[in-house]
Amino acid sequence: MSQPTVRRETPTDPVGSDPAPRHTRRSALPLPVRHLLLAALGLAAVAGLLLVTGDLTALRLAAVGYTMLAVAGLQLLVGASGQVSLGHGAFMMIGAYAMALLVLHQPMLPLAVNLAIIVVVSVVAGIAVGAATARLHGPYLAGATLILAVGLPGLAHRYHDVLGGSNGLNIRTAGAPPFLQGLVSTSEWRALVVWTTVVLGLALLATLSAGRLGRRMRAIRDDETAAAMAGVPVGGTKVVAFVIASTAGGLAGGLQAYVLGTVTPGSFTLVLSLTLLAALVMGGIGSLWGALWAAIAIVYLQIWATDLARALNLSRDVENNLPIVFFGVVLILVLRFWPLGVHGALHSLRARLRARES
Amino acid sequence: MTHFINLTLNGLASGAGYAALALSLVIIYQATRLVNFAQPALALLSVYTAYTVTQLTGSYWVGFAAALTVGLVVGALVERVIIRPIARTSQLNAIIVTLGLLLVIQGVVGMVWGNEQHGFRYAFDYVGRFAPSDVFALASVGGVALLLFLVYRFTPLGLRMRAAAFRPEAARLSGVKVGLMLTVGWGIASLIGALAGMLAGPPFLSPNVFDVVFVFGITAAVVGGLDNPFGAVVGGLLIGLGMSYVSGYVGPELATLSALVIVVLVLSVRPDGILSRPTARKV
Amino acid sequence: MRPRTRTRALPALGLALIMFLTACGGAGEVGDGADVDLDVAPGVTDDAVVIGSHQPLTGPAAPGYLAVSQGAAAVFDHVNAQGGVNGRSIDYRVEDDAYDPSQTIDVTRQLVIEDEIFAMVGGLGTPTHSGVLDYLNEEGVPDIFPSSGALAWNNPDEHPLTYGWQTDYTKEAKIQGAYIAEHFAGQGVGYLYQNDDIGEDSQAGLDQYLTDDVVARQHYESEVADLSSQMAELERSGAEVVVCSCIPAFVALGMLEAARIGYEPQWMVSSIGGDTTTLQALLAEFTQDTDAEGVPADTFLDDMLITTYMPRVEDEDDEWGRFFLAIYEEYGEGGPVTNTHVFGMTQAVMFAQVLMSAGEDLTRRSLIEAMDEQEWRGPGSVPFSSSDGDHGGHEGVYVVQYQEGGAIEMVQEPRVTDREGGAIEETDFEPLMPEELPFHD
């Protein structure tokens, strides 16, 4: 499980725009501002979507949002710094339980404060895990993070007075503020809150990834020894990558708890961690856009497959298991024919179209 | 004291299963530098085949042979048909594809055999502390590890396989059929995976029966060191014992967490596992 | 990136924005929900009524619970073949949640919003159903017979639309405890329980009668299929009676493990784990062709005591058992009928009764009133409560003993109790007979 060898072909710009700066007015703006603009656009798009859809879509859009944030954090860890983590679900779990405990025991704290506290908790967790695994590489890192994801839910069982055991914690959170009541439903409001946090987080991730830290991480991914000789603080950068990933994962988990209102160890399984990584690679590991495709795949592929299975009128055992098989087959086919994932395929398609135009 | 002995024997018995799966992971890693997530699924397919064949023929050992055959053949096929075209482009992609394969095979097993549980017997009598079935598990895992060690170190086949894995270009130039070696590696690994399934599957089979076993299998391989078959055995037994003691003395809910502690402790002292040789890094 | 200050300004800006957006009060400060409108009938047409359920059809929990919705579906097919209920056929939609609460929430919304179900029937599992309990009640969706014995379902003040089904774990355990105290006085008792509300609520009941005799309390996690250390500890403690508050897979595992170490306690198993048809099939496959042991599957189960409130398929004299076997023969998915199937089938029968009683002019209110205003008699052998602020469902259990060869004998008539410290009482309840059913052919 060593570094992705496709890296040299991948676009290094995190938002996937052309690496060569084009001389437009847009590129005259500083990068963070551009990312913020893009974030505002994204939020507007989601708000527009919410306007024309109902509560069910609001729930699923929110799921796409927090899943995307989690995957984006993983993207920075795996795609940029080359550390393959199979334990991302563990960070989501930490964030989700932090949110549930805060809402239960400090109900008067505003959501933003809760999210800020979750960031702090996640940073601490990221430092701990990053420092413990900084010397590990390849499959050893993968194995250690894998057992982290599987072992951590044990805490919920051990301390079930506080963490609720396998039934977990159920929370109720406030809906839309009074002046918006009647305009947006609770689910739509939650989706908006999620996406506001998510686009801000993504803008920050994009800025970090394009900056010095991103360059250092890619240098380590490409050749650790060379990076060290060039003066890059290898250990420190690796830990920072873990901290960023854990923060994104923790925030995502916190938002999930906020949206779903329930936190149980049964939601943070091995399958979740593996799915996050698999979907990331399927979406495209070279770009934050890949995280979007990954999140859509995680949330919607199973739903589509279930509808498909219903329509086909199959025997019960086949119908039940079809969604799982479908996800696996799509995963294999995408990687077989588009080694750079969905984003890579779209990217080259665009390049081809542009070549034909000129 | 009897409690301690009981826990030790239990730990050894379950550790044998982890060790067997770890062995199969180590073989594939040595042959292709990949961690194969489809390994538990291949084992699952093998065990369910054994279950059906045993039902049809009435003979456990015919089923046993069928399981090993399925492991060997399907493992080789998977390498040829699915992994090879993808491994060429990217190693990470190949690993993710094994994940996809895990989902597909697990789902297909559910489609064919249903998601209900099925009872499936052990190879030998299981009654008693350290029963014949436990002895068989430990002995077969130890025997396989020794056999692999000998094959890798002292036979031309082993030499070719190692050459194909570590220096594919140089191996090709010296006339080694690198592709064939990779296929052979996957075949052997999946055969051992099938054995692992036959040891760890009973008493009750279901499509998710190996999820947890697999996690401890990877853990065992990592703890023991991926470059040495004996490492897998040492790692498997260590994980099995550790979990048994923690489960017995502290509480079963902490068993998986104790595996995490073992991994952290071992890898912080030896980042490449217990039995790894110190390797010189290229500069 | 030269302008590092801007990078740092970004999170501050973001935080400020969220603060602004959500500054209105604490995240956990929730007002009372508005009253729900029950005078509606989504999913109801002149000739059909859509109902939904969330069940684990795949994943680690599927093996134990697949049969529940299969059984229910067979009964609904039977009812529809008789012309449905009040001229409406029942459209029973089962969604797979893989026993993952986050998926339960998604599929429940899908059922309510997209499929427009009239009611949720038999949603399975404590962690899963807990996550949608508030939602269903806030949306005004009748939440009939959740499939688990959690105490949470019986809370009409907070969840007026939720009606429990299963005899809750504490009531069942109280009757188990009293039975053991009476028939096995002075013997050491060991508990083996699943480490969640099953274990917690069961101990609360058992301890009322057994405290002094308890010599060991061992638990398991449903993720870890290993009982070796627990059984070793139970044997070491000298427990002569083992009360197993476990699901069938772990009852079977516990029995195998006991046989392995030559430990032969008297087993007392709760209704959730006492599905002898499932246990027997598992153990029979396991022991098949192993003359090394020479142990028929039955000897594992011999003398096992089971508490239950439902009819049982292995009882040839049970009219309901015969009735369900016949239905499954005709409408089922094939394979043996287990008591887990019967669990879903009894729920389906009772729901069909309630639906019929709710009348031709069907609304959610008429369904709730039908639940509330009657003393329901269904296939269950104990009284059923769904009115007067008590949504507890079945009120007690009877005790049966399994005998080698598959016979089952009732050793204690049905008794009822409450979930607090109240007394255990006998009951002269007469269950409904299949031929009294309106849709019996």
Image (spheres, coloured by chain):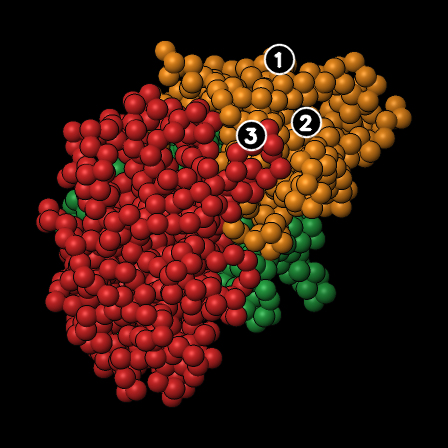
Chain colours: A green, B orange, C red
Q: Position of residue C103 (x, y in %)?
A: 41, 56
Q: Nearer the viewer, residue C60 or A45?
A: C60
Q: Are marks 2 and 3 on the same chain?
A: no
Q: Which mark is residue B277?
A: 1
The amino acid type of the residue labelled 1 equals Arg
Instruction: Decide which of tag 1 and tag 2 comes sooner along the chain.
Output: 2
Q: Is residue B103 left or right of residue C194?
A: right
Viewport quadrant of the C terminus of chain C: bottom left
Q: Nearer the viewer, residue B29 or B239?
A: B239
- In the rendered image, which residue does mark 3 sit on? C293
Q: Is residue C259 left or right of residue C108?
A: right
Element class at badge 1: loop
The amino acid type of the residue labelled 2 equals Ile
Element class at badge 2: helix
Looking at the rendered structure, the number of numbered marks drawn on it comes to: 3
Height in image: C48 above or below B242?
below
Q: Which mark is residue B27?
A: 2
Q: Nearer the viewer, residue C235 or B176?
A: C235
Q: Nearer the viewer, residue B233 or A241?
A: B233
